[in-house]
Amino acid sequence: MLRRRDGRTAIRSGDLGLCMDARRDKYLAIAARYDHKLQIRLGERTRRQAFADFDLRAGDTVLDIGCGTGLSFPLIEKAIGPSGKLIGIEPSPEMLAAAQQRADASGWKNVKFIEASADDADTSERADALIIFRVHEILRSQSALEHLLQLVKPGARLLVVGVKWAPWWALPVNLVIWRQTKSVTTSHEGFQRPWDIVADLVPILSVRSVNVGAEFIARGTTAA
């Protein structure tokens, strides 16, 4: 871990690789039941809530970073339509295979998959929107975030959703969070304010807590 001048911590670029390797190992063990785990344990209400007010448009090119099994794909596809393009980036081949099956079963012809970490991902065109959904390790790596922001157009829209520690008075909630996230994240570092590094890089970012403060939804716009 790297301690920043402002006292906050972040993941070094080399450390991120180790974290993502550990994440791939975790996902290899749970890939077959990942959808059920997330839908039952963490719930999908926040996902629907996050996309309800997110300004995706028909024809947009969207990057879904750490797309997992493609749980966000239906909501993205509904917004961008067949004229849009969805690029799912995921380092776990098992998760990517499940996402491919989801796209094939749904008949989505506009989905492209890239097996890569956030630090290494590259695309041939710049995106209109960037989505990072419950991938805590990426949010704690300034180098990964800086690289991802180079893959989008000026003025691109950003949606970041994640789990966080609830307020101090909600200790039982935090115990549940710890139990539910220990199999899908490698570290709880920065769980108090997971978005703080993003806020330093994106000039316009609004953040709100949901679900008794146990999750957050952040929306922003990159520099024009």
Image (spheres, rainbow, N blue to C red):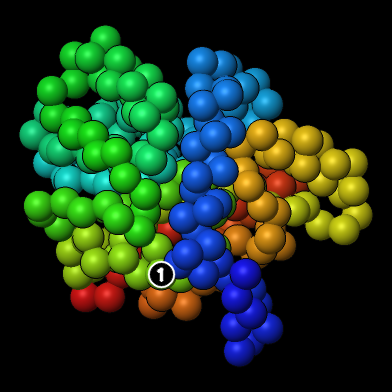
Image-based side of 87 in relation to 200, left or right: left
Quadrant of residue 97 within the rendered picture: top left
Q: Residue furthest top?
A: 105
Residue sitting at x 36%, y 29%: 93
Location of residue 163 in the rendering, given as x and y in whole percent from the top left corner = 63, 47
Quadrant of residue 122 within the rendered picture: bottom left
Residue sitting at x 45%, y 67%: 13
Q: Is residue 173 visible?
A: no
Image-based side of 222 in relation to 176, left or right: left
Residue sitting at x 18%, y 64%: 153
User: Where's the N terminus, which quadrant?
Assistant: bottom right
> Eyeballing the image, is 94 above or below 217?
above
Location of residue 164 in the rendering, given as x and y in whole percent from the top left corner = 68, 52
Q: Amino acid at mark 1?
A: Ser
> Eyeballing the image, is 66 above or below 11?
above
According to the picture, the residue beneath numbered tag 1 turns out to be 143
Mark 1, Cα crowd under 10 Å, few <14 / some 14-19 / many 20+, is some
Residue sitting at x 51%, y 22%: 31
